[in-house]
Amino acid sequence: MAYPDKPTDGSVLHWRDGAVAHIRFNRPQALNAIDRDMAAAFARACKEVQADGAVRAVLLSGEGRAFMAGGDIGEMRADPARAAEELIAGMHGGIRRLAALDAPVICAVQGAVAGGGLGLMLACDLALAAEGTRLSVAYPAIGASCDCSTSWSLPRVLGLRKAMELALLGDTVDAAQALQLGLVNRVVPAAQLEAESHALVQRLAQGPTRALGSMKKLLRSAAQHSLDEHLDVEAAGFIACTQTEDFHEGTRAFSEKRAPQFQGR
């Protein structure tokens, strides 16, 4: 399954460029706020990306001047419980699929990153932010607790005390503060966000995909294990990597003093 051409409509665009899958939120007139159609489209896009064996890295982005300004409040006011259930089902389904990928998932953000947008960004493996980006948990302002993995990610990224502060007060942080806190990996000039994120995702797409997937799982599961347990998990992961074509290529390339040419196998 491949997506060689960028779609021209829809609230979520998705396509594949070589080994890189792109998922782009496309409601710029609403600052990419999540409505039910967008949540369902996101879930479908993630399902198709997960089924595409040629994907070796994924880039999430938002069209227009914001990455994602949270949920669509107007839609949720009309039928709160049902709208919330459908929005959350779609977004959480997509997040689960992205988290299960061996392929690294990169998020490029700009403008507003609020509520579910922040949770989605944190669920990705790496995040780049444009200068001028503003990030907020946002949920207290509408009288809600969080979704989109926000409460899972925040304490892991920030530690419990700082996560509590950001979540309970709902304060907004700018891109520089987000970098200092570790919410994002890099901050770049707004005009360079697309080029920088594309360069990073292409670099990762050329890596040993199955080894990177193992590394992701090890890092995300570490807090659930004792040291003794995690040493066993690490050993199993490394031994599994030795059975891959990329491991044999990497060790050959090291011996031959050349750059490896990984194939993701």
Image (cartoon, rainbow, N blue to C red):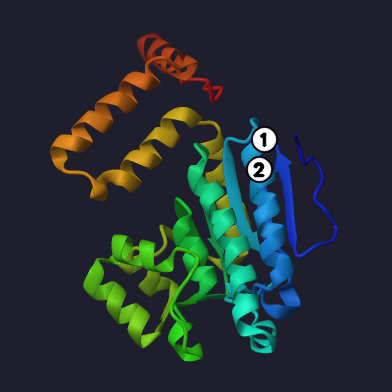
Tell me the SS state at disc 2.
helix
Residue 67 seen in this snapshot:
no
- For residue 232, which quarter of the picture? top left
For the residues bearing labels 1 and 2, Cβ distance under 8 angstroms: yes
Check disc 1 and report the residue beneath it. 52
Q: Nearer the viewer, residue 195 or 79?
A: 79
Check disc 2 and report the residue beneath it. 49
> What x and y, as percent, mark residue 82?
64, 77
Residue furthest to the right: 8
Kindly report the distance in space between the C-alpha atoms of the residues bearing marks 1 and 2: 5 Å
Q: Measuring 75% from the left and 56% from the top, which residue is drawn there?
A: 13
Q: Nearer the viewer, residue 114 or 195?
A: 114
Residue furthest to the left: 228
The quadrant of the image that shows the N terminus is: top right
Q: Measuring 71% from the left and 41% from the top, which residue is drawn there?
A: 16
Residue 182 seen in this snapshot:
yes
Tell me if 8 is positioned left or right of 70 in this view.
right
| Amino acid type at image mark 1 | Asp
